[in-house]
Amino acid sequence: MWYGVGNTGLPNPAAAFVEWLDDGTANLLAGCADIGQGSDTVLAQIVAEELGIGAENVMVTSADTMITPEGGATSASRQTYISGNAARLAAKEAKQVAIAEAREMLKTNGAVDFADGVVVVDGQPGTMTVKEVLVGSCRMKGKLTLGHGWFNPATTGLDASTGEGSPYGTYAFATQVAEVEVDTETGKVEVLRIVASHDVGRAINPKLVEAQIEGGAVMGSGYALLEEINVSKGRIANPNFDGYLLPMSLDTPEIYSFIVEDPEPTGPFGAKGVGEPALIPTAAAIANAVYDAIGVRIYSLPITPERVLQALANKDTAAAKN
């Protein structure tokens, strides 16, 4: 539903435009915002793969409300999956426009495709480049070689009687293991290493996937050990970073990332999101590791030194009573 100039969490589609330029490059217009996760890079790679050109030849304009179509929120680990599909569909449409022009220029009825910037006929690379096709189409004939893509994942609500349905387009799977060291004198917990294994469908850009996993693990360690909002008389008592602590570079443990690729049938080239799944298992893994170390569970986060010492004291008291 739409209210004024904003929108709620639903619906969940995204759109994109891809336009060929007469130098053999392409413009991608997508509404999704790259907030550091690398979606601009991934979308460029998706478009380039579909068009048969190098990713360096795709210029991305994103999140410009004057010229880009709606891309939805950068949340729910959705942009690679949702906007990626929209970008691929737009590239497919733009490619077909250029292929039709190439077929006319070559006067062929064979199967025409593009690969590495060259026109391919019946599986055999020829001498004509994509740039030559576009010069003939865009510059000489004034044709608009533009493609539009729109994607909305197919979902169904949960059945009231069975509880079954498909409320989401895709699902994420992840496992993390943490190794910690607990100082029983001070209560301090140090995370030594985290091993993270994540099913990402297909890693369009493995380095970006690893960075997402590592960033999520660090964020999760802050959730587990440091971050806590203290409220006093209805007001936040620690509104600044001197009281609301975040993990720093020196707090970062060794992180081993393992990318599991089980292609998602509905994703662009099999891809799906990894942004939030990278964060979700970390705190639980650390809490379980602390339990394994001291033999008593701590159920409140963050696991501060005070809570560790209190848990150990309660354990000793219970042991004494027995």
Image (cartoon, helix red, strand yellow):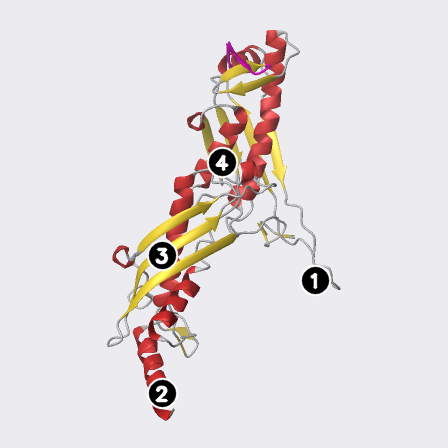
Is residue 286 magenta-colored? no
Instruction: Kindly identify the amino acid type of the residue bearing the numbered disc 4.
Output: Leu
In space, the residues marked 2 and 4 are separated at their CA atoms by: 58 Å
Between residue 295 and residue 113, name the one nearer to us. Answer: 295
Residue 163: mark: 1
Q: Which numbered mark, 3 or 1, is in the foreground of this view?
A: 3
Query: Quarter of the image holding residue 178?
Result: bottom left
| Figure check: 237 above or below 62 | below
| Amino acid type for the residue under numbered disc 3 | Ile
Q: Nearer the viewer, residue 213 or 104?
A: 213
Q: Residue at x 41, y 68 (%)?
A: 288
Residue depicted at x 61% and y 48% = 169
Q: Give yes or no for residue 126 being in the magenta stretch.
A: yes
Sequence order check, earlier mark of 2 and 3: 3
| Sequence-first disc among 4 and 3 | 4
Name the residue at 38% across, 52% down.
215
Q: x%, y% of residue 105?
A: 60, 8
Q: Amino acid at mark 1?
A: Gly
> Can residue 36 be seen here?
no
Q: Which residues are the magenta region? A: 122-130
Decide: is 151 above or below 73: above
Left or right of residue 293: residue 165: right
Residue 43 numbered tag: 4
Residue that carries the numbered disc 2 in the rendered image: 319
Amino acid type at circle 2 is Ala
* Badge number at residue 288: none
- First in sequence, mark 1 or 2: give its number: 1
Q: Nearer the viewer, mark 4 or mark 1?
A: 1
Disc 3 marks which residue?
A: 194
Q: Secondary structure at mark 3?
A: strand
Determine whether the residue tagged by mark 2 lies in a helix, strand or loop. Answer: helix
